[in-house]
Amino acid sequence: MTPHIAINGRVSKHGVVRKTAVDGRVTRHPGYAISQVVRKRVEEIFGWAKTTGELAQVKLRGIAKVSALFTLGLAAYNLIRIPKLLAAPA
């Protein structure tokens, strides 16, 4: 099994492309492209939760309270997504 990590192919200020541990054997498979699309979707959810959902720095203590805040934050995200999901063609 090969992990599908993201490739950072940015060019440095000296004009050198960053090297990555992921080679062409991994990236040539169609599953890698699908994995990266799904990864972006998941990262968008957590990004929203950190900025708008106030989960960047939790001001609560205890696993139960933080878990409840996390559940409430992602439930709010789902409520925001409902109009877009209903408007999407089937």
Image (spheres, rainbow, N blue to C red):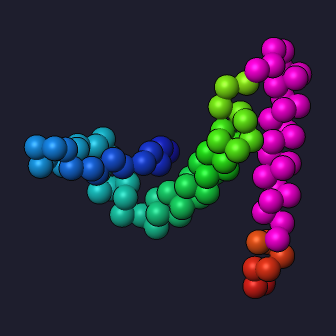
> Where, by quadrant of the figure, is residue 40 drawn?
bottom right
Observer able to see residue 46: no
**Left-right relation of 37 to 25:** right
Residue that appears at 42% across and 48% down? 6
> Where, by quadrant of the figure, is residue 88 drawn?
bottom right
**Left-right relation of 57 to 7:** right
Above or below, 81 relative to 55: below
Above or below, 75 relative to 37: above
Is 54 one of the magenta-colored residues?
A: no
In the rendered image, the residue lying farthest to the left is 14
Main SS of the magenta segment? helix
> Where, by quadrant of the figure, is residue 61 drawn?
top right
Observer able to see residue 1: yes
For the C terminus, give its image quadrant: bottom right
Residue that appears at 75% across and 85% down? 89
**Left-right relation of 24 to 70:** left
Residue 37, x across and y down, in percent: 54, 61
Residue that appears at 37% across and 58% down? 27
Above or below, 83 relative to 59: below
Residue 64, x across and y down, in percent: 89, 22
Residue that appears at 87% across and 40% down? 72
- Magenta stretch: give its range: 59-83
Is 66 one of the magenta-colored residues?
A: yes
Frontmost residue, 20 versus 64: 64
In the rendered image, the residue lying farthest to the bottom is 89
In the rendered image, the residue lying farthest to the top is 61
Residue 32, x across and y down, in percent: 46, 59
Disc tally is: 0
